Image: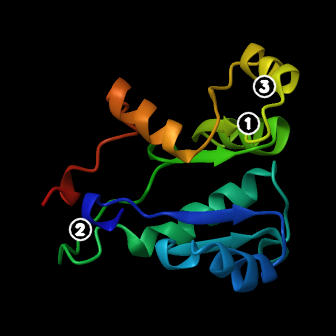
Amino acid sequence: CMRHGIACGVLSNADERYGDSILPMLGLSDHMQFFTFSKNVGVEKPGKEIFDAAIQDAQPWLCLGNKRSDIKQLMPEEVLHIGNDYEKDYVGATSAGFHAVLLDRYDEKEVAKGWREGGAPVFKDLIDVVEWLGREQYELGSRDECKI
């Protein structure tokens, strides 16, 4: 992520043990630059405040290593939130100005159908999301100052 000026993080209603034990067990913690937990913010998803806190937590990681002191503030429209709950993740993120997609990891066809009818892009896993982003040449916003 970092070579493209992208900060990857976790935004969760779970407590910080999720970041301390579960993510390392899955081998994911080394790939995340920031963690935003509702317990620390005092607001759970879908509250806008937790999404705002994630932007603040991500900001220091943007363009790290580019030695630019004029990095612009991260804007909500430059963020893609990936979740698994329509109200908390899709509605919460889009209400905060983020782009959002949902994962249907358990092949719940009727649930996923409802999400799609509500406007959410739905994917099976993160690989599908990455392929979709590349195929659609999806742009979240301009971070020209991060070009290497």
Element carrying mark 2: loop
Task: Point out which mark residue 116 bears.
Answer: none
In-front residue for pair 67/81: 81
Q: Is residue 130 left or right of residue 87?
A: left
- Could you say where residue 80 lies in the image, as x and y percent from the top left? 53, 45
Element carrying mark 1: loop
User: As displayed, is residue 44 above or below residue 61?
Assistant: above
> Label 3: few (<14), some or many (≥20) within 10 Å?
many
> The residue under label 1 is which amino acid type?
Asp
> The residue under label 2 is which amino acid type?
Asp
User: As displayed, is residue 31 above or below residue 86?
Assistant: below
> Residue at label 3?
112
Q: CA distance from mark 2 to mark 1?
A: 39 Å
Residue placed at 74% from the left, 58% from the top? Answer: 49
Choose mark 2 or mark 1, whichever is in front: 1
Q: Are marks 1 and 3 in contact (CB under 8 Å)?
A: yes
- Could you say where residue 40 lies in the image, as x and y percent from the top left? 78, 78
User: As displayed, is residue 40 above or below residue 75?
Assistant: below
Q: Earlier in the sequence, mark 2 or mark 1?
A: 2
Extreme residue in the bottom direction: 20
> Residue at label 2?
70
> Label 2: few (<14), some or many (≥20) within 10 Å?
few
Choose mark 3 or mark 2, whichever is in front: 3
- How is the rendered protein coloured? rainbow
> Label 1: few (<14), some or many (≥20) within 10 Å?
some
How many marks the image carries: the answer is 3
Q: Earlier in the sequence, mark 1 or mark 3?
A: 1
